[in-house]
Image (cartoon, rainbow, N blue to C red):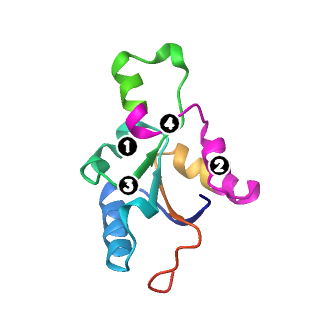
Amino acid sequence: MKKVVYGVYGTREEVIGAIHDLEAKGFDGKDITLLAEKEETLDFARYHKDLKLKVPEDSPEDDTIIDKVLKIFYDAGNLRLEDNLADAGLKEADADRYVSSVQNGGILVLLDKGKKIGGI
């Protein structure tokens, strides 16, 4: 499903606040995708089982067995950050704006496109 950007956040507290705001507006966790450069950036979100968590995949030779298992849960696939954004349906020009923010530790919050609740 294609996505729209809700925002880019620099701290986990900001992301948790955004998730709570979205849920208050009627969005389900399954409507929300978090995209970050590193898996550990999204560790805080494990409490919310419905959220979709995505991280670009590092080179497979660097993966430990734990990393490989975590990739199953984090839906990393074999996508680079740019591929994740393109897969979400963002135009290249729009995606380019978010790449550096995410690469610098930001967390991108995406919503399933077409889901209109609470004025979003």
Q: Is 41 left or right of 6, judged from the image as shown?
A: left
Q: Position of residue 112 (x, y in %)?
A: 53, 64
Q: Residue at x 43, y 31 (%)?
A: 71
> Which quadrant of the rendered structure holds the N terminus?
bottom right
Q: Is residue 44 left or right of residue 71?
A: left
The kind of residue on which mark 1 rests is Thr
User: According to the image, label 2 marks what residue?
Assistant: 87
Q: Marks 3 and 2: CB-CB under 8 Å?
A: no
Residue at 35% across, 38% down? 40
> What's the distance in space between the residues labelled 4 and 1, CA to CA?
14 Å
Q: Which residue is mark 4?
A: 76
Range drawn in magenta? 72-97
Q: Residue at x 48, y 16 (%)?
A: 62
Report which residue position mark 3 lands on: 51
Element assignment for label 1: helix
Q: Residue at x 55, y 52 (%)?
A: 101
**Alpha carbons under labels 2 and 1: distance apart:** 21 Å
Tag 4: amino acid: Ala
Residue furthest top as drawn: 61
Question: Number of marks in the image?
Answer: 4
| Cα distance between the residues tagged 3 and 4 | 14 Å
Q: Which element carries disc 2, helix, strand or loop?
A: helix
Disc 3 residue crowd, few under 14, some 14–19, many 20+, Cα 10 Å: some
* Separation of marks 1 and 3 at Cα, in angstroms: 14 Å
Number of the front mark, 4 or 1: 4
Q: Observer-nearest residue: 56 or 76?
A: 76
Question: Label 1: which residue?
Answer: 41
Of mark 2 and mark 1, the one earlier in the sequence is 1
Q: Say if 78 sits above or below 47 in the image.
A: above
